Image (cartoon, rainbow, N blue to C red):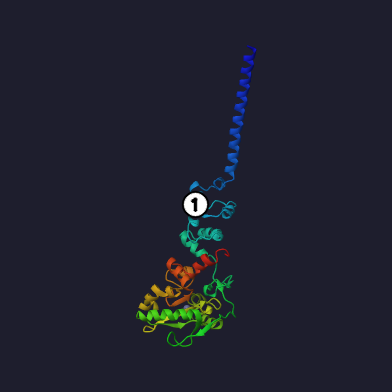
Amino acid sequence: MYKKRKIRKQAKRNFILLTLIIFISVVGIKLVDDYLYQQTYEYKLLQINYSLDEIKIIEKELEDKQIDSLLTKDYNPNLTKIIINKYFIYNNLDRYSNYANENKDIDLNKIISLVNVNRDRDFYKEPIKNNYKDEKLMLVNKYYYLDKDYEPENIITTTGTYSYANNSLNEETYNAYQELYDAAKSDGYTILIVSSYRNYEYQEELWNERKALYGTRKADEYAARAGHSEHQTGYALDVADFYDTNDKFGDTKSYLWMKDNAHKYGFILRYPKDKEDITGYSYEPWHYRYVGKETANKIFKENITFDEYYAYYLNKEVN
Ligand SMILES: [Zn+2]
């Protein structure tokens, strides 16, 4: 009898002990679970108001260090729309948001293109010196400039077959142009170089003439300021149809041929129609830039400008 009572007492004690252990374990596991969950990006992003759907996109599109920096910022309602854009550059994130706030009528995808090419900044205001290692991929525009004494190497004089007199340009560009010329010729078009390499002083004169005639704003629309002209690189050229020498190259069949074929020889139309806000230049159907076949094909296929190509493919980390 005594023994039986002792066993029952012990069983009761064991039961309480077991319950306690289970309780502590469950609470413990829950605490550890909570702790671990609190370390996740999901938890941290929820704390700054991102929805689960948004978090899914953020975790898919961004690297850890980018999410870490995101956690130091306020909720951005445009964030997921921005980061799914193909040409989104993380370092430009704040600039996209600021520019979008100032320009509520502009589509977000357009905002990304514009900011990538610095259009949230004024032309010529804080010029960036161009020293891109591959000369053929140098960007020269209203933000990037070449020094007054920058003179490209391998500049050669052209012959009468391919150009009007007094033209000179980069040798590789000229060789590629001859290929293009021959191909166009065999399709029945004669396309000649009318203007190519121009040095700093020449460009300065050109712009000053325009300025004297039309004022600064108009001069900027039609000509680059000295140091900011692509013609100073030796990789740019203006063309004309041999039989249609007026300045309406855009209306010629030669232009249509260039539109479909120039990239095959490494050339791109540098200032396309409807991209004026990206390039900062009026449409120039006659102005081509040599960038090599690989780059030209990519730019053609993606239907982007060289400014956008440079920002996204060549300068993303530097920006
Ligand atoms: Zn030109």
Type of amino acid at the residue the image marks with label 1: Ile
Front-lying residue, 295 or 217:
295
Residue that numbered label 1 is attached to? 57
Where's residue 207, x and y in %? 52, 80
Image: 273 above or below 31: below
State which quarter of the image contains the N terminus.
Answer: top right
Where's residue 261, x and y in %? 40, 74
Q: Which image quadrant for residue 131?
A: bottom right
Q: Residue at x 42, y 73 (%)?
A: 264
Horizontally, is 174 left or right of 35 in the view? left
Horizontally, is 19 left or right of 262 in the view? right
Q: Residue at x 53, y 67 (%)?
A: 314
Q: Count neighbours of disc 1 (C-alpha within 10 A) and say few if under 14, some if 14 to 19, many if 20 or more.
A: some
Image: 234 above or below 59: below
Q: Residue at x 46, y 78 (%)?
A: 176
Q: How many marks?
A: 1
Where's residue 195, x and y in %? 47, 82
Q: Can residue 309 be seen by looking at this rendering?
A: yes
Which residue extends farthest top?
A: 1
Where's residue 281, x and y in %? 47, 73
Q: Can residue 119 be seen by looking at this rendering?
A: no
State which quarter of the image contains the C terminus.
Answer: bottom right
